[in-house]
Each structure stands twice: as structure tokens, then as C-alpha cells.
Amino acid sequence: MPLLAYGVSFRTAAIDIRERLAFPPDELGEAVAGLRQDLDGVSEAAILSTCNRTEIYCALEARDEAPVADWVAAHRAIGRRDLEDTAYVLWDGDAARHLMRVASGLDSQVLGEPQIMGQVKAAYDIARGSGTLGPELNLLSQGALYAAKRVRTDTAIGKNPVSIAYVAVTMAQQVIDLGAARALLIGAGETIELVARHLKSTGVREIGIANRTVERAEEVARSMGGHAMGLGELPARLRDYDLVISSTDAAEHIVSASMVERAMLGRTRPLFLVDIAVPRDIEPQAGLIEGVFLHSVDDLALIVEENAAARRDAAVQAEGLIDKGVAHYERARVLRDNRHLVQRFRQHADGVRQEVLDRARQRLDNGQDSADVMERLAHELTNKLIHAPTVAIRDAGVDQRADFLESLRTLYGLE
């Protein structure tokens, strides 16, 4: 049964196309059930939909992606021409390799990002709950998730942070006990939201959000369990914090050296400042004050690049694991597809055994010598079991089928 992977990703489609194709999480179960119900040739289906990709995995009766493409066009209000220009079509082993690379983070915008493995698992759990998973996609999902786990555990692809936000928090962790620290984030944009999420995951004691627009600061703080303030409160509040991370689009310094100097008066704890804004939010001279550690976006960018290089090196090793994963998947698929042939072969052998055994018992019942009966049983059993292979060897020799003869030599260990 052909296996299809049909979809688009950030590599093939602009964000406006990806937005139109995306399935909201609460619609995935209904969508995947509808796909199998609407298309007679689809026996199994799963949909993976994230901000960077929408992919449909199907087991089909015929090797034809057109019905799936038509279904996507009809259900996501997009023209077939747009799909043809951006969608990729992968079959069988290529489809399996693709999903393994996706689940491992090898096909992500941020190489090695860890969230995608959970998203792949969730997509297949939804399909399983919707009754659209069968032996084909069960085998695929198990193989993909196993390969992804191997990549995570056997390589360093996820061990080096490659986002400015994550590096900022990681750097702070090296010098500050975040579990006992108060953190102040200046700004309320996407980068600060990412920093806030990373900080929250570390168990930081407290998060404050300072922003020019207090309402926006309150919105971010509310989602993180923190508190908000306006920029005008910074001079009086700065001394309360151990870590300050700033990322705004201000044209001038928001935190001056004199402001930091006042905050350090009578203070014994160090103050860790991270300025990831361009232009800079924190006056560079603040880093000269005793007890103050100031890092700029360039410091972080250097670490990001070093970590990205380490991930690229790890990706080479990861691709080798993917190769092994694909080979294991394809072997398992062949074994599964041939299980009925194996069963019939064993049934045939058992039938021959039973036939010869019944005749031997009859001879014993008729009083024949037991040694003669055993000798004849062995002879008849051998002849019956090797008759078909013997005929096949003779025919292959006449037809000069060297490949078949070599397979038989391997099968029976013949020199």
C-alpha cells in the first residue's frame, strides 16, 4: 500500500500560504476524520500542522496524490495552482525519511529545535483518537519518533541554544541562581516574550515587565504570572532586581550608567545586565561599574553562531542515524507485508510434516520395523521439502538467472 507525504513548509511556501493551509489544533481531529471519509482511496491519514508546515500523511490504495491535493484545495480555500507551486510529494521511503528528519528537528527553521518532536507525536495521537491510524501509519509514527529520540540522545543537536532569547537566559543561569532571583524585562515584544517563557521554565523567583505602554506590559506579565510597570519607574525599581534583560526599539538609552550606579549604592549582590537591543538600551559605561556584568547583543550573537556551528556538526551525525532509521523502517515494512507469505510457507511445511508423519504411524501400526519406518520418514520428508527448491534451481540454471541462484546460495548457506 503506497505511503504519501503531501505538504508545504517554510522551505517551499511563504507565510501567507502557510497561514491559509494551517489547521487550528481544535479542528485537526475533525479534519483528519473528514479526509479519510471524503476520499475512498485513503485508508489511513494524519495531519501535522505547525507555524512552519502543514503536512498530510496517507496510506492510499493507488499511487496518486491528486485526490489529496484536491481535498486540501477545497478545505483550505486555496487554488490548486498555488499548491502545485509550493507543495512537495514524497512516497514510501522518502516520506518516512522526511518525517524522521522533521521529528528530529533537522528540517526546522532553527536546526535541532525540540518542540517539533512533541508536535509530531500529538498529530499522530489525534489521528489515533480519530480512528484514522492503521498498521501503515502506526509503523511510520513509531519509526519516526524512535529515530528522533536517537538523534536527541546520541547527538548534541539540541544541547546548544541557538536563539538570542535562550542564550540570554542560559548565560544568566551561569552566574545567577535564578530560583532565588528577581528578573526585570524591559520591552514587551516577541523577543521579550520568548525570554519571559524561558525564564519561567527555569523557575525564576519573580518576573517584572517594564514597557513604554503599560497596558502591553500588563498583557505580557499576566501570561507569565509577573507584574508590570512603566519605564518611568525604572530609576526607583532597578535596585530590586538581580537580572535585567532589555529589548526595545527606543532610539536612546533607556537605562543610563548613572541609573545603574544609583541602583548599586549599598548593594552587595551583583547585577547582571543583558542588552539585546539595536540601538542599545543600556548605556555601555554601565558595564564599568563594580558588581555590574553587562553583555550586548554582539556577545550573545557570537555564542549563538558557535552553538549553531556545533548543531550543524551534530546534524551530520544525525543524518547517519536517520539513514539507519529509514533502513529499519523499510525492513519492518517488508516483513509486515510478507507476513502472510511466511504464514502460508510455514503452513505448507507443517502440512508436509503431518502427511509424512501420518504414513509413518500407519506403517508402525502395521508392524513394520521402527528403524525402517524412521529411515523412510526422514527420506520422504526431505524429498518433499526440497522438491520445489530443486526444480527452481534447475529452471534458474537453464534460464541463467544468476540473481536467483545467488539468493538460494545465501538462503541455504551454500558455497
Image (cartoon, rainbow, N blue to C red):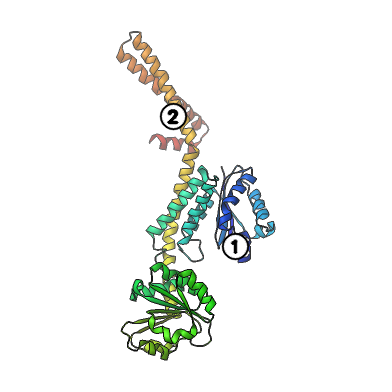
Indicate the position of residue 63 as horizontal and vertical percent values. Answer: 61, 45
Q: Going from the N terminus, do you reach mark 1 or mark 2 first?
A: 1
Say what secondary structure mark 2 lies in. Answer: helix
Marker disc for residue 12: 1
Residue visible at 68% across and 56% down?
80
Outermost residue on the top side: it is 366
Which one is in front, 66 or 167?
A: 167
Residue visible at 54% across and 77% down?
215
Instruction: Please name the amino acid that badge 1 sits on.
Output: Thr
Is residue 356 depicted above or below 31 in this figure? above
User: Relative to residue 251, is residue 270 drawn left or right?
Assistant: left
Indicate the position of residue 388 as horizontal and vertical percent values. Answer: 47, 26
Q: What is the C-alpha distance between the residues marked 1 and 2?
A: 49 Å
**Around disc 2, counting alpha carbons within 10 Å, would you say few (fewer than 14), some (14 to 19), or many (20 or more)?**
few
Image marks 1 and 2: residues in contact by CB distance under 8 Å: no
Whether residue 398 appears in this view of the structure is yes
Which one is in front, 359 or 72?
A: 72
Q: What is the count of numbered marks?
A: 2
Is residue 415 depicted above or below 29 in this figure? above
Indicate the position of residue 13 as horizontal and vertical percent values. Answer: 61, 63
Instruction: Please name the amino acid that badge 2 sits on.
Output: Arg
Which one is in front, 89 or 22?
A: 22
Marker disc for residue 346: 2
Indicate the position of residue 138 as horizontal and vertical percent values. Answer: 49, 46
Say what secondary structure mark 1 lies in. Answer: loop
Picture quarter containing residue 168? Answer: bottom left
Quadrant location of the C terminus in the rendered image: top left
Residue visible at 41% across and 60% down?
317
